[in-house]
Image (tube, grey):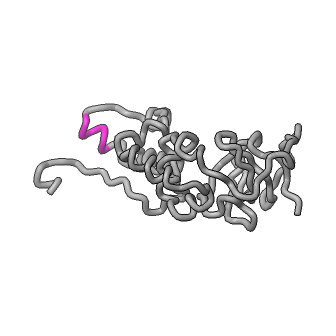
Amino acid sequence: MCKEKNICLVIIDEEGLDKRGFDGYVNNINKKIIENIDLINIKTSTSITRNKVLSIEIDKKDIFKGLYDVDKLNKICQSYTNYSKFIKERRDVYNKIYYLGLLKNFTKHMKIENVTNERFNFILEKRNFYKKGDLVLIEYWYNDMITICRIVDIIGRKFKVSHDVEGSDIRNAPDEVIKSSDILDKHSK
């Protein structure tokens, strides 16, 4: 149909997407645009460069606005009082409100089971000794949750962590990248 109407269609699919999540999607879109940059420049009479594509800053709070019914997402969140159960049953909603920047506001009423901040009242001065495989305690400042996770990768000064470990209060949450300042300490059994 596009050919019949003389429309140049560039398809940006999710096949081969290494990392699902905001950064993965942005990298995938950039890659597809760069792969088709000559065609795009010819069809649009522009001279966009690879560096120009890579320099575009995207605010993850704005990119998803208008795609979701925010009131409906909030209503779903308000129907939960247990954070772990919410993530287990509505991971789709968790992901959406996370990318919209609404996670703190929409989940602040939820309770985390078996967590007392008193036992984690220290923060280590040095945080550069963590390695892949370490179980660590991380703190979510927006809802005062402290939970266990495993470091699965080190990305510069940041750590990619998995919540799929025994004892995690958000075991079904997707992997995420955290700053060293989010780590309270190594987890000791």
In the rendered image, residue 86, in percent from the top left (x then y), is placed at 55, 58
Quadrant that contains the C terminus: bottom right
Examine the structure image and report whether residue 42 is included in the region drawn in magenta. yes
Left or right: 180 in relation to 29: right
Q: Which of 178 and 13 is in front in this view?
A: 178
Instruction: Name the foreground residue: 153 vs 51.
Output: 153
Q: Which residue is drawn at 61% across and 57% down?
A: 82
Q: Would residue 131 be counted in the magenta stretch?
A: no
Residue shown at the point (49%, 47%) measured from the top left:
97
* Residue 171 appears left or right of 127: left
As drawn, 20 above or below 53: below
The dominant secondary structure in magenta is helix
In the picture as drawn, the residue positioned furthest to the bottom comes out as 166
Position of 178 relative to 44 (above/below): below
Q: Residue at x 22, y 48 (%)?
A: 8
- Residue 51 as seen in the image, left or right of residue 40: right
Q: In which quarter of the image is residue 85?
A: bottom right
In the rendered view of the protein, which quadrant contains the N terminus? bottom left
Determine the residue positioned at 81% across, 54% down.
131
Q: Which of 81 and 74 is in front in this view?
A: 81
> Is residue 103 at all visible to an observer of this figure?
yes
Q: Where is residue 158 in the image (x, y as percent from the top left)?
A: 71, 44
In the rendered image, residue 145, in percent from the top left (x then y), is placed at: 70, 48
**Foreground pick, 171 / 136:** 171
**Residue 149 point in image, percent of width and height:** 73, 58
- Counting labels gives 0
Specify the segment rendered in magenta.
39-44
Q: From where the camera sits, is residue 51 visible?
A: no
